[in-house]
Image (cartoon, helix red, strand yellow):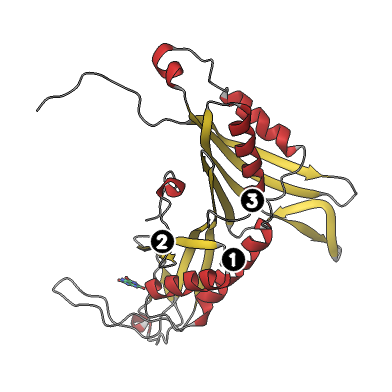
C-alpha cells in the first residue's frame, strides 16, 4: 500500500460560537424581549490562513460576534429570519465566503402576571421547550431547519407495550396500560424551493409545536415509535413547506412500585420515575419523494 505524504487541508469552517444576544424592543412602555444564543460559522477559501498564516480572508470571529449584535439593533423577528440575514451578509460581503452555517437557540419569556395583569417590562423565563434554528448556505442553495428540544410530555394512559420477542434475557412484563413520557427533540427541514422571505417562521413554529403536542395525545400508543411517527405525519400532512422531520425522544420509564409489602394494592397509581437508563427512540419522517439534504443536517448532533 502506498501512502501519500502530500498533506492538504480538508473541510473547514470557523466562526463565533454561542453569542448570547438579548434584544429589548422599547418603542412603547410595553417592552418586548427576544433572547437568542447564536453561532456563526463561515465556509469558503481559508486555505492561506491554514497553510501560510495569511489572514487576509479571515473575517475575525470577533467581527462575526459584533455583526450579530449590530444586526440585533434592527430587531430579530424570528430566529430563522435573523440567521438568514446573517448568511446573506457574510456571503455577499466577502466574495471568498461561499457559504456557512448559522445556528440559534431561542429562549422564551412570559410576562409576569402582577396584580391581575401582564406586566409591561418584567418577565419570567418560560420553563417549556427551547426553540432551535439552523441556516446552512452553500453557493446559491440555502437550507433552513427549525426545531425544538426539551418539550416534556406525559400521558397517564392510552399507552402499552406488548408483542415484542421474548428471549432468555427478556424480563419486561407486557402492559396495555402504562405511563408514556418523553422529552421531544424535533428538527424539521423546509423544502429548498421555499420562499424564505415570504415565510412566517414564528407562525409555522407555533403551529408545528401544536401539531406535535396533539399528535402525542391522539391515538393509543403501541410504542413510542408509533407515537413518533404519528406526530411527524401530522406535521408533514399539514405543512407542505416541510420536507422531513427528525425526532430524538427518550422513553422516560415510569415503573409501578410494589406496594404489597405495605399491604396496599397499586392499580397504576404510584410510580417510580427513573431518570436512567432510558430507551432512546430516533427516526426521520419524510415524504417518499423527498430529495435528501445531508449537508443541511451535518453538524446537527443527536439525530439519525
Ligand atoms: O415504546 C417502547 N418502545 C420500545 O422499543 C421499548 N422497549 C422497551 O423495553 N420498552 C419500550 N417501549
What is the x, y in percent for residue 84?
Answer: 62, 44
Residue linked to disc 1: 209
- Toward the viewer: 207 or 19? 207
Residue marked by disc 2: 275
Residue 106 picture location, percent across and down: 62, 49
The residue under label 3 is 107
First reached walking from the N terminus: tag 2 or tag 1: 1
Q: Does residue 60 sit above or below 42 in this rendering?
A: above
Residue at point 72%, 49% (across, down) = 77
Q: Residues within 10 Å of mark 1 (few under 14, many from 20)?
A: many
Image height of 76 relative to 61, above or below: below
User: Is residue 129 rendered to the left or right of residue 31?
Assistant: left
Separation of disc 2 and disc 3 at Cα? 24 Å
Q: Earlier in the sequence, mark 3 or mark 1?
A: 3
Residue 184: tell me if it is visible: no
* Point 66% across, 57% down: residue: 199
Counting from the top left corner in percent of width and height, residue 145 is at 53, 53
Ligand 1 falls in which quarter?
bottom left
Relative to 109, is 280 above or below? below
Q: In front of the other: label 2 or label 1? A: 1
| Quadrant in the rendering for residue 298 | top left
Q: Label 3, label 1: how many angstroms apart (C-alpha)?
A: 15 Å
Location of the C terminus by quadrant is: bottom left
Dot 1 falls on a residue whose secondary structure is helix
User: In the rendered image of this protein, does residue 126 appear above or below residue 168?
Assistant: above
Q: Residues within 10 Å of mark 2 (few under 14, many from 20)?
A: few
Amino acid at each position: 500500500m502506498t501512502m501519500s505524504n502530500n498533506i492538504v487541508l480538508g473541510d473547514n469552517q470557523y466562526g463565533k460560537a454561542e453569542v448570547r444576544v438579548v434584544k429589548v424592543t422599547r418603542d412603547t412602555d410595553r417592552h418586548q424581549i427576544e433572547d437568542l444564543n447564536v453561532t456563526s460559522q463561515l465556509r469558503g477559501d481559508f486555505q492561506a490562513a491554514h497553510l501560510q498564516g495569511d489572514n487576509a480572508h479571515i473575517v475575525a470571529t470577533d467581527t462575526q460576534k459584533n455583526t450579530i449584535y449590530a444586526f440585533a439593533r434592527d430587531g430579530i423577528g424570528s430566529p430563522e429570519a435573523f440567521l438568514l440575514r446573517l448568511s446573506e451578509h457574510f456571503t455577499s460581503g466577502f466574495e471568498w465566503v461561499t457559504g456557512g452555517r448559522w445556528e440559534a437557540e431561542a429562549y422564551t419569556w412570559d410576562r409576569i402576571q402582577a396584580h391581575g395583569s401582564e406586566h409591561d417590562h418584567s418577565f419570567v423565563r418560560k420553563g417549556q421547550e427551547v426553540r432551535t434554528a439552523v441556516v446552512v448556505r452553500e453557493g446559491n442553495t440555502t437550507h433552513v431547519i427549525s426545531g425544538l428540544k426539551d418539550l416534556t410530555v406525559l400521558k397517564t394512559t392510552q399507552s402499552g407495550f406488548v408483542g415484542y420477542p421474548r428471549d432468555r434475557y427478556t424480563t419486561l412484563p407486557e402492559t396495555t396500560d402504562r405511563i408514556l413520557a418523553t422529552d421531544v427533540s424535533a428538527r424539521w427541514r423546509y423544502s429548498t424551493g421555499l420562499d424564505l422571505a415570504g415565510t412566517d417562521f414564528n407562525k409555522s413554529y407555533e403551529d408545528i409545536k401544536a401539531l406535535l403536542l396533539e399528535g402525542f395525545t391522539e391515538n393509543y400508543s403501541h410504542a413510542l415509535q408509533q407515537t413518533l411517527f404519528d406526530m411527524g405525519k401530522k406535521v408533514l400532512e399539514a405543512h407542505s413547506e416541510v420536507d422531513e422531520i427528525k425526532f430524538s425522544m427518550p422513553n422516560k420509564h415510569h415503573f409501578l412500585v410494589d406496594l404489597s409489602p405495605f399491604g396496599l394494592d397499586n392499580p397504576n397509581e404510584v410510580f417510580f420515575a427513573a431518570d436512567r437508563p432510558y430507551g432512546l427512540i430516533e427516526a426521520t419522517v419524510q415524504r417518499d419523494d423527498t430529495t435528501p439534504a445531508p449537508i443541511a443536517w451535518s453538524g446537527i448532533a443527536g439525530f439519525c
